[in-house]
Image: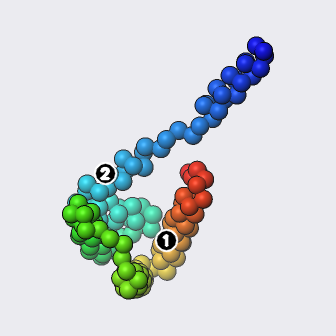
Amino acid sequence: MKKIFLIALALISLQAIAQEPKKEGRKNHNKMMMNLSAEEAATLQTKKMTLHLDLDESQQAKIKNINLQNATKRKAMMAVRKAKKESGSAQKPTQEERYAMANAKLDHKIAMKAKMKDILNKEQYAKWEKAKMQMAMKGKNKKRNSKRGTPMRI
């Protein structure tokens, strides 16, 4: 009887130890990024791109402008979404609204690609495209794992 009790206790202990720790770092990072102004977010994004793509001064200025426009637009959309949520009028979009949003998103991506192609040289553009693809795949995998209910591996 004692042996069965000890084995059960050991298995329960191992199960408790084997649990994956909660990842709080990403939540804090997201909150910090949400609290940044559009100018600060654009500056950080531009500096990251400068490090990754080895941009010169004129490229940095042009890309910072683009990043500032995107950050301002994103902040405005977040404010509208937050206001709807707080007022209680948040509803799922209709099929036509979803189509319009998807169409606008794709138009924006096409415009971004064209702007980046004008600013970056061929090697930088190829590197930027590769990074965008990797981020898209990472997002797809994250979404797929969350749907299956399996823990995400980082």
Residue 116 appears left or right of 129:
left
Residue 87 sits above or below residue 100 on the image: above
Would residue 86 be visible to someone looking at this image? yes
Q: Quadrant of residue 70?
A: bottom left
Residue 92 sits above or below residue 40 on the image: below
Residue 117 sits above or below residue 1 on the image: below
Q: Give the mark nearer the N terminus: 2 vs 1.
A: 2
- Foreground: disc 2 or disc 1: 2
Instruction: Residue 61 in the image: state x and y as whole percent.
Output: 28, 72
**Residue occupying image coordinates x 36% and y 47%:** 28
Q: Which mark is residue 32?
A: 2
Q: Label 1 sits on what residue type?
A: Lys
Would residue 67 be visible to someone looking at this image? no
Question: Quick one: 40 or 71, which is closer to the camera?
Answer: 71
SS under mark 1: helix
Question: Quick one: 130 or 151, which is closer to the camera?
Answer: 151
Question: Quick one: 67 or 79, which is closer to the camera?
Answer: 79
Instruction: Residue 104 in the image: state x and y as whole percent.
Output: 36, 84
Which quadrant of the figure contains the N terminus?
top right
**Residue occupying image coordinates x 39% and y 65%:** 50
Question: Quick one: 55 or 73, which is closer to the camera?
Answer: 73
**Residue occupying image coordinates x 29% and y 68%:** 90
Colour convention of the picture: rainbow
Q: Which residue is mark 1?
A: 132
Q: Label 2 sits on what residue type?
A: Met
